[in-house]
Image: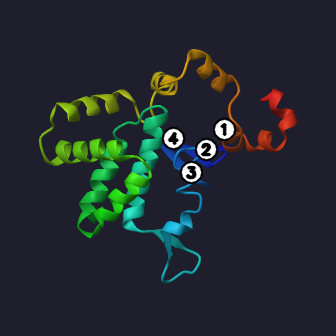
Amino acid sequence: YSLKGKDDVFHKKPFYNFEMHRRLTSRGHLHCDYYDDPLVYAHQDAKDDHLYHLSIEEEYIYILEHAYKHYEYAGVGIRYLIDMYVYLAVYKEQMDFEYIVKQIEKLQMQEFYQKSYQLCMNAFDGEMNDEDKAFLDFLLSCGVYGTDKQQMDNRMKGNSKLAYLKERIYPSDEVYQDLYPFFYKYKVLLPFL
């Protein structure tokens, strides 16, 4: 078990991993504003006033957004494609894709969504083209949550090595707030982190 910032993470042998999120996105993340108040996209349960549910479209968008977060940070494996495929197999006929595309544009994830959707459909129900194969190869090289090498490559894009080192040595307040809330609250203790 570990308690860090926005997540409570539980591990159970042999291979179970449960993440309980207290926030849908990290502070300072590209999509932080979109999910700042997740109840905006939720509706109250008909039987229990204490429960709220995302619409099937918003749940699908969140599956994609969560994968995108990993993709942008350190890469993402193929698990999300399987989630996407199963989700679409169950809900596709009920989903409002005009709304989904509009929200995907608002989140600036069009290219990731197009590549993911195309690969998902072609890998399971069609024939993959060269672009699909290249994207699949990339996803397979990323493990489940990405790799340290991919994280470094992604963070170096458009930055100098000095800027990257500065970010690693002096993380932003958002990083401290999410990953080390105790030290964020008691900043005088930061040197002991």
Amino acid type, mark 2: Gly
Left or right of 93 on screen, residue 37: right
Q: Quadrant of the N terminus?
A: top right
Q: Which colour assignment does the render follow?
A: rainbow
Q: What type is the residue that disc 4 sits on?
A: Lys
| Residue found at the very far left of the displayed protein | 127
Report, in whole angstroms, how far the alpha carbon at label 1 lies from the one at label 4. 29 Å
Disc 4 crowd, CA 10 A, few/some/many (<14, 14-19, 20+): few
Q: Single out the mark in the foreground, 4 or 2.
A: 2
Residue underneath mark 4: 13
> Which element is circle 2 on?
loop
- Cβ–Cβ under 8 Å for marks 3 and 2: yes
x 20%, y 48%: residue: 121
**Label 3 sits on residue:** 32
User: Which is more N-terminal, label 4 or label 1?
Assistant: 4
Q: Image point 34% across, 47% down: which residue?
A: 110
What element does badge 1 sit on?
Answer: helix
Separation (CA) of disc 3 from disc 1: 13 Å
Q: x and y percent of residue 50 in the render?
A: 59, 76
User: In this rendering, does residue 80 appear at all?
Assistant: yes
> Which comes sooner in the sequence, label 3 or label 1?
3
State the mark number for residue 175. Answer: 1
Badge 3 amino acid: Cys
